[in-house]
Image (cartoon, rainbow, N blue to C red):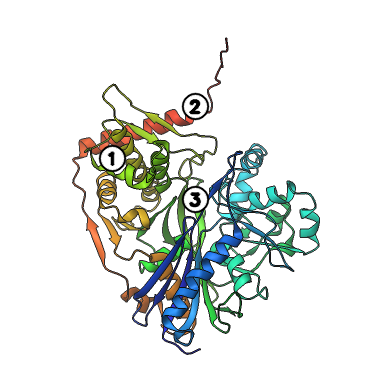
């Protein structure tokens, strides 16, 4: 097909989107479908893999109907990352619900690995802390807790992969089972230096090689679509990349220096680096993308619960419109009046990496209101982002003195101002609401020759809004110190035995 637009699919945790991007690199049409996330009684976080696929078909079809199949040069894919799908190779049907990146079901296994002294080895090979966030322990848990699955996996009857793998498998009618290097680097099974699956990690997590996808580059023709579920065949799939990495591309960042933060259900801060030189465990080393035989590395900090904390507050208040209610309450007061919410409902991610921590509220007084709690939920996003940004600053003192922002929650201007105030630095917000999809589209266009180079892509970067800090230094310091104390107290809770008294 020789069209002049790119179709990009962005399969996220709470929404599945698709966009059409024209030759000038601009989004000319977008559509989305909300996704259901299920939290079970055991606290597991799951999604229906078939729902992920069906929603993808819906948004892809909407774009194809809008543009016409002949106008589409290629499809690019970006996705929620560590989420795991396990499916039958022959039937193409999932054998278990998808285990979402937020799920903590493998926390005990991860804790045991740390006690056994395995974390330094794992980090040296994969660049990742031992944490339930990563895919490997999720896959191991599935194989250990379902009778017969491990045997079937060893015999090659099952496929496993992150969401990009699942979608490519379905789009090609089962002909291609692959993942790109950026998604592979989030599994805790990849050797960062070689860009290949590491046999030692596969043995440690007892994951058969037969079930793993092939690793491909993030930009370049991977396969062609088959005529499946009403979608046309013959369209090149020319990119696959994790959503946080794709957002960095969408900002037009292709060299070390800038730091970007994606404000979503959770958040990721990422900055490019020249090599895979590993730092201490507060930050991860990851592969930003792969192309033309080269691996581009990055430092990253992952936060489990940012935008989700605002929704949680609304759910806690039993609102029928949880997000809108929380934001309206938060905007009704000027500050949280000393109230802090630490949203560790699924543990704390970077820079603390404490899966045992649980959420808590501090600083309540007789004059505290639900509005102050809602404001504290909003401020918790900015505090957690600041925690990771400050870690990056300590390791990269010469980096650019601003934060590049994207993601759904970044559309909240009040949050962006709070973020600038707590950092004491400008926040540069992309005006593109679908930056990850745009990044995936750019890489796909690069893969089929619609564009020629990273500098050409950088020139197409969307316009931005800039938020300058306004808060005085003394108030900023007091707010940050209060937050740090709240986090410290939250982490102490898990180490303090509780005596339950019954009468």
One can see residue 254 in this view: no
Q: Quadrant of residue 322?
A: top left
Residue picked out by circle 1: 329
Q: Position of residue 335 (x, y in %)?
A: 24, 37
From the image, tell me which residue sits under label 3.
279
Q: Earlier in the sequence, mark 1 or mark 2?
A: 1
Q: Residue placed at 64% from the left, 57% from the top?
A: 189
- Using residue 44 as the reference point, say whether residue 12 is left or right of it: left
How far apart are labels 1 and 2 at the CA level? Answer: 29 Å
Locate the C terminus and report the quarter of the image it occupies.
top right
| Marking on residue 70 | none
Element on which disc 3 rests: loop
Q: Nearer the viewer, residue 31 or 120?
A: 31
- Give the x, y percent position of residue 56: 52, 67
The total of numbered circles placed on residues is: 3
Q: Residues within 10 Å of mark 2 (few under 14, many from 20)?
A: some
Earlier-in-chain disc, 2 versus 3: 3
Mark 2 — residue? 493
- Dot in front, 1 or 3: 1
Gap in angstroms between the C-alphas marked 2 and 3: 28 Å
Helix, strand or loop at label 2? It is helix
Q: Secondary structure at mark 1?
A: helix
Instruction: Let me know if residue 285 appears in the view.
Output: yes
- In the image, what residue occupies the spot 76% across and 54% down? 149
Q: Earlier in the sequence, mark 1 or mark 3?
A: 3
The image quadrant that residue 176 belongs to is: bottom right
Q: Which corner quadrant of the image does residue 473 belong to?
A: top left
Residue 93 is situated, as x and y percent measured from the top left of the image, at 68, 63
């Amino acid at each position: 097909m020789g069209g002049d637009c790119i179709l990009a699919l962005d399969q996220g945790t709470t929404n599945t989107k698709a966009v059409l991007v024209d030759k000038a690199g601009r989004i000319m049409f977008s559509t989305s479908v909300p996704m259901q996330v299920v939290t079970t009684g055991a606290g597991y976080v799951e999604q229906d893999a078939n729902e992920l696929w069906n929603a993808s078909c819906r948004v892809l079809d909407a774009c194809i109907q809008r543009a016409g199949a002949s106008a589409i040069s290629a499809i690019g894919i970006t996705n929620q990352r560590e989420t795991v799908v396990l499916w039958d190779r022959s039937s193409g049907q999932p054998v278990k619900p998808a285990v979402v990146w937020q799920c903590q079901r493998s926390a005990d296994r991860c804790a045991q690995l740390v006690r056994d002294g395995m974390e330094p080895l794992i980090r040296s090979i994969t660049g990742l802390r031992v944490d339930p966030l990563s895919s490997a322990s999720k896959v191991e848990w599935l194989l250990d807790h379902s009778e017969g699955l491990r045997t079937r996996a060893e015999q090659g009857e099952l496929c496993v992969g992150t969401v990009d793998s699942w979608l490519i498998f379905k789009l090609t009618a089962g002909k291609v089972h692959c993942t790109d290097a950026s998604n592979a680097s989030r599994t805790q099974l990849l050797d960062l230096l070689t860009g290949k699956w590491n046999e030692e990690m596969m043995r440690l997590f007892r994951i058969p090689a037969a079930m793993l996808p092939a690793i491909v580059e993030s930009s370049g023709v991977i396969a062609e679509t088959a005529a499946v579920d009403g979608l046309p065949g013959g369209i090149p799939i020319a990119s696959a990349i994790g959503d946080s990495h794709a957002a960095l591309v969408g900002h037009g960042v292709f060299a070390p220096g800038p730091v970007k933060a994606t404000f979503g259900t959770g958040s990721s801060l990422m900055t490019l680096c020249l090599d895979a030189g590993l730092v201490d465990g507060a930050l991860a080393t990851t592969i930003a993308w792969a192309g033309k035989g080269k691996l581009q590395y990055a430092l990253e900090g992952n936060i489990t619960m940012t935008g989700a904390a605002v929704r949680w507050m609304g759910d806690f208040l039993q609102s029928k419109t949880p997000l809108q209610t929380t934001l309206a309450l938060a905007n009704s007061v000027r500050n949280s009046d000393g109230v802090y919410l630490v949203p560790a409902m699924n543990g704390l991610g970077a820079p603390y990496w404490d899966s045992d921590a649980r959420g808590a509220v501090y600083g309540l007084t007789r004059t505290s209101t639900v509005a102050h709690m809602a404001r504290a939920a909003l401020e918790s996003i900015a505090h957690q982002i600041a925690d990771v940004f400050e870690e990056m600053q300590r390791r990269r003192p010469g980096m650019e003195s601003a934060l590049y922002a994207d993601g759904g929650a970044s559309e909240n201007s009040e949050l962006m101002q709070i973020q600038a105030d707590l950092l004491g630095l400008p926040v540069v917000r992309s005006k593109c609401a679908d930056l990850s999809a745009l990044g995936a589209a750019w890489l796909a266009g690069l893969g089929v020759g619609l564009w020629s180079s990273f500098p050409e892509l950088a020139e197409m970067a969307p316009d931005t809004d800039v938020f300058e800090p306004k808060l005085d230094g003394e108030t900023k310091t007091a707010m940050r110190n209060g937050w740090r104390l709240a986090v410290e107290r939250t982490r102490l809770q898990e180490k303090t035995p509780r005596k339950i008294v019954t009468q």
